[in-house]
Image: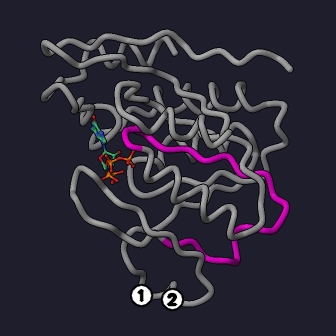
Amino acid sequence: MKLLKEKIVNEGIVLNENVLKVDSFINHQMDPVLMKEIGKEFAERFKDDKVSKILTIESSGIAPAIMAGLEMGVQVIFARKRKSLTLTENLYTSSVYSFTKQESNDITVSKQYIEPGENVLIIDDFLANGQAALGLAEIVQQAKANISGIGVLIEKSFQPGAEELLAKGYRLESLARIASLNNKQVEFAPERTYQNI
Ligand code: G4P
């Protein structure tokens, strides 16, 4: 997606060969114009998939997910990483291991908000090791709903998450694919294309 790639080039900061800082438009300050366009892009890419719900994870997945939900006319639910005071019963839970933080965290979604048989689109900001996306996918499976696909803003193609999700048969739509962050430079990978079956 051209606009997102331009933002990455103009405002992204390569912290090291593994980490891209995008605090000025995704992870801290958020750009509503960009988020609106991202919502439209996901709506276009999944327009034939009868998506009935969007599932994301707090916090940085929420903005693009809500914009996609607005465009697609569906509700958006975010998995919680922290325990909620009011949300304590009837939960789907999955354990997500963060390689970055070297710790596991339980993520939770109320059983109330995912119906069996629904078509769920999973959205997140970064795809690195894929653990968050896999945790969300597990929750959709627990709910006996269908996974329409996984949409991410930034895929770091040099890390194993994308391959793992594809190997499990999920449709993966990445709005920007990064091949390398070596030498303090962002090198993009070409868009992944799916052949019509
Ligand atoms: P994984 O889910 O793909 O396995 O990712 P990992 O455990 O490696 O990442 C943990 C956190 O770091 C996630 O955010 C993820 O979005 C973020 N992250 C991974 N790689 C990058 C990167 O290159 N740049 C930036 N800016 N973030 C990255 P989180 O802790 O859940 O944060 P938030 O959603 O609350 O903002």
Secondary structure category for the residue under label 2: loop
Using residue 38 as the reference point, say whether residue 51 is left or right of it.
right
Q: Is residue 16 above or below residue 66?
A: above
Q: Residue at x 18, y 16 (%)?
A: 182
Taking depth in this image into account, of 135 and 53 the one nearest to the observer is 135
How packed is label 2: few (under 14 Cα within 10 Å), some, or many (20 or more)? few
Taking depth in this image into account, of 179 and 72 the one nearest to the observer is 179
The quadrant of the rendering that contains the C terminus is: top right
| Numbered tag placed on residue 85 in the rendering | 1
Q: Amino acid at mark 1?
A: Leu
Q: Residue at x 60, y 29 (%)?
A: 173
Is 126 a magenta residue? yes
Image quadrant in which you'd find residue 170: top right
Q: Is residue 162 above or below residue 106?
A: above
Picture coordinates of residue 145 (x, y %)?
A: 77, 61
Q: Amino acid at mark 2?
A: Thr
Depth-wise, is mark 2 or mark 1 nearer the camera? 2
Q: Is residue 80 above or below residue 154?
A: below
Magenta residues span: 108-129
Taking depth in this image into account, of 61 and 136 the one nearest to the observer is 136
Picture coordinates of residue 155 (x, y %)?
A: 43, 29
The residue where tag 2 is placed is: 88
**Ligand 1 contact, mark 2 (Cβ < 8 Å):** no
| Numbered tag placed on residue 169 in the rendering | none
Q: Is residue 182 above or below residue 33?
A: above
Q: Are marks 2 and 1 in contact (CB under 8 Å)?
A: yes
How packed is label 1: few (under 14 Cα within 10 Å), some, or many (20 or more)? few
